[in-house]
Image: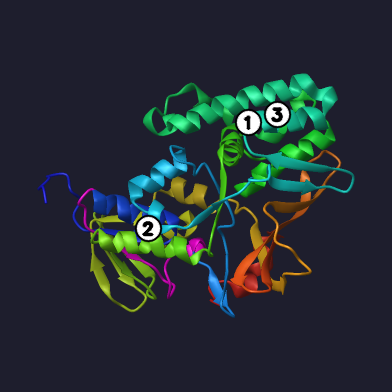
């Protein structure tokens, strides 16, 4: 191992979701020793599925975009070394990724920018000029995403202030109809932010990634969690599970160690917290956090949570679908007030398919179960 004067010593990473495990893999590739600490018995966060009656039921990963060879997520996975470890199946082989079902019309999200533009024009023939403006912006952001310019050049023009305005506000200023707004509102929900709050740049990035190519895991989400975990371990990274961080010790403005729930003390001068900022502040001594920062974090509003159900259904009565179905209810402005996501797939067992259904559920509804585990 090359000796470097700027190596920050042993690094601790709090949280073993996709962010924490990715950080651990990257540090291991850079010959920087690190340990991931996870309070739950199993690592992987929302990458992990649960198994019931021999069927893998996904929790947080139902489909992904930009995973074709050479595309952004594929390139990232290749760098991490997890691509060959995660079995995938391509969506859209019959032309449709998603079907949006409203009370009075249906819109199909196809594969590719050109097909998406054509579907918009056919569905909304009186809004040609608005669609042209939307597609011009979408293609510009898509090129940025493909080149990963936002990583290489933070000063790039696509990160200008106007691209952090709410997408809903932009559509209203353009005069988009209620129906067109309803269709365009769906991708904002991919990243858990209502259209009227979703920054333009992030909105277009989410939509562009799925139009590039859409994929779902071939055999349940367990493989994704295990792929990241096995890759971390193969590079010499370590993971501690079932023992969360109780306190981050700070002396003279410098992190010294963390104390786990078990009382175990792990020495480290560098801690990466891949968890909620409010949780990070609660782990630090009050004097270690600038009051202005603590106030900003305290004022953060959580996005809505999700409530999901997985059901084994008779395959003869409920044939697997090669696309997802969204059942949607917009308000009078076209913003989505309610929606249910459906995915009907083969389960891997003869005669049984797996129906996954997800809808939004406010954080406050889950307060009685805070800090509990299933």
Classed neighbour count for the residue bearing mark 3: other residues with Cα under 10 Å, few (<14), some (14–19), many (≥20): some
Region of the chain picked out in magenta, as a range = 30-47
For this rendering, which residue is in front, 28 or 13?
A: 28
Mark 3 and mark 2: Cα distance apart in space? 37 Å
Q: Does the residue at mark 3 contact the one at mark 1 (Cβ under 8 Å)?
A: yes
Q: Position of residue 252 (x, y in %)?
A: 24, 54
Q: Position of residue 232 (x, y in %)?
A: 31, 60
Q: Is residue 52 magenta?
A: no
Quick one: SS at disc 3?
helix
Picture quarter with the C terminus:
bottom right
Dominant secondary-structure state across the stretch colored magenta: loop
Q: Does the residue at mark 2 contact the one at mark 1 (Cβ under 8 Å)?
A: no
Residue 289 to residue 168: above or below = below
Classed neighbour count for the residue bearing mark 1: other residues with Cα under 10 Å, few (<14), some (14–19), many (≥20): some
Residue 301 to residue 58: above or below = above
Q: Earlier in the sequence, mark 2 or mark 1?
A: 2
Residue 194 to residue 374: above or below = above
Q: Which residue shows up at 40% across the image and 34% down it? A: 151
Quick one: SS at disc 2?
helix
Q: Position of residue 50 (x, y in %)?
A: 54, 72
Point out the residue furthest to the right here: 104
Mark on residue 21? 2
Mark on residue 113? 1
Q: Which residue shows up at 55% across the image and 75% down it? A: 51
Q: Which residue shows up at 31% across the image and 54% down it? A: 25
Q: Does the residue at mark 3 contact the one at mark 2 (Cβ under 8 Å)?
A: no
| Residue 237 visible (yes or no) | no
Residue marked by disc 3: 117
For this rendering, which residue is in front, 156 or 319?
A: 319
């Amino acid at each position: 191992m090359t000796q470097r004067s700027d190596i920050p010593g042993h690094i601790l990473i709090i949280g073993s979701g996709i962010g924490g495990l990715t950080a651990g893999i990257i540090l291991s590739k850079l010959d920087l020793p690190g340990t991931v600490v996870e309070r739950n018995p199993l690592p992987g966060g929302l990458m992990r599925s649960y198994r019931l009656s021999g069927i893998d039921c996904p929790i947080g990963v139902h489909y992904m975009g930009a995973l074709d060879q050479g595309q952004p997520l594929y390139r990232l996975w290749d760098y991490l070394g997890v691509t060959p470890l995660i079995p995938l199946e391509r969506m859209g082989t019959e032309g449709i990724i998603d079907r949006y079902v409203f009370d009075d019309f249906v819109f199909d999200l196809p594969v590719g920018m050109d097909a998406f533009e054509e579907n918009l024009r056919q569905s909304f023939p009186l809004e040609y000029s608005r669609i042209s403006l939307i597609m011009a912006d979408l293609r510009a952001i898509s090129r940025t995403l493909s080149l990963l310019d936002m990583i290489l050049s933070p000063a790039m023009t696509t990160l200008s202030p106007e691209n952090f305005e709410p997408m809903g506000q932009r559509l209203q200023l353009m005069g988009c109809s209620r129906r067109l707004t309803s269709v365009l509102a769906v991708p904002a929900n991919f990243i858990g932010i209502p259209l009227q709050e979703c920054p333009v740049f992030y909105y277009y990035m989410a939509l562009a990634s799925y139009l590039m190519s859409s994929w779902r895991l071939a055999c349940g989400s367990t493989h994704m969690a295990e792929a990241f975990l096995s890759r971390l371990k193969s590079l010499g990274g370590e993971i501690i599970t079932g023992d969360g961080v109780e306190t981050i010790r700070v002396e003279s403005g410098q992190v010294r160690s963390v104390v786990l729930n078990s009382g175990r003390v792990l020495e480290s001068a560098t801690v990466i917290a891949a968890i909620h900022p409010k949780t990070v502040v609660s782990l630090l001594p009050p004097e270690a956090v600038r009051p202005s920062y603590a106030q900003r974090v305290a004022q953060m509003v959580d996005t809505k949570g999700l409530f999901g159900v997985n059901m084994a259904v008779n395959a003869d009565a409920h044939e697997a679908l090669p696309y997802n179905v969204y059942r949607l209810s917009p308000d009078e402005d076209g913003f989505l007030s309610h929606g249910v996501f459906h995915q009907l797939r083969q389960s891997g067992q003869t005669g049984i398919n797996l129906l996954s259904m997800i809808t939004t559920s406010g954080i406050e509804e889950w307060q009685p179960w805070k800090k509990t585990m299933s």
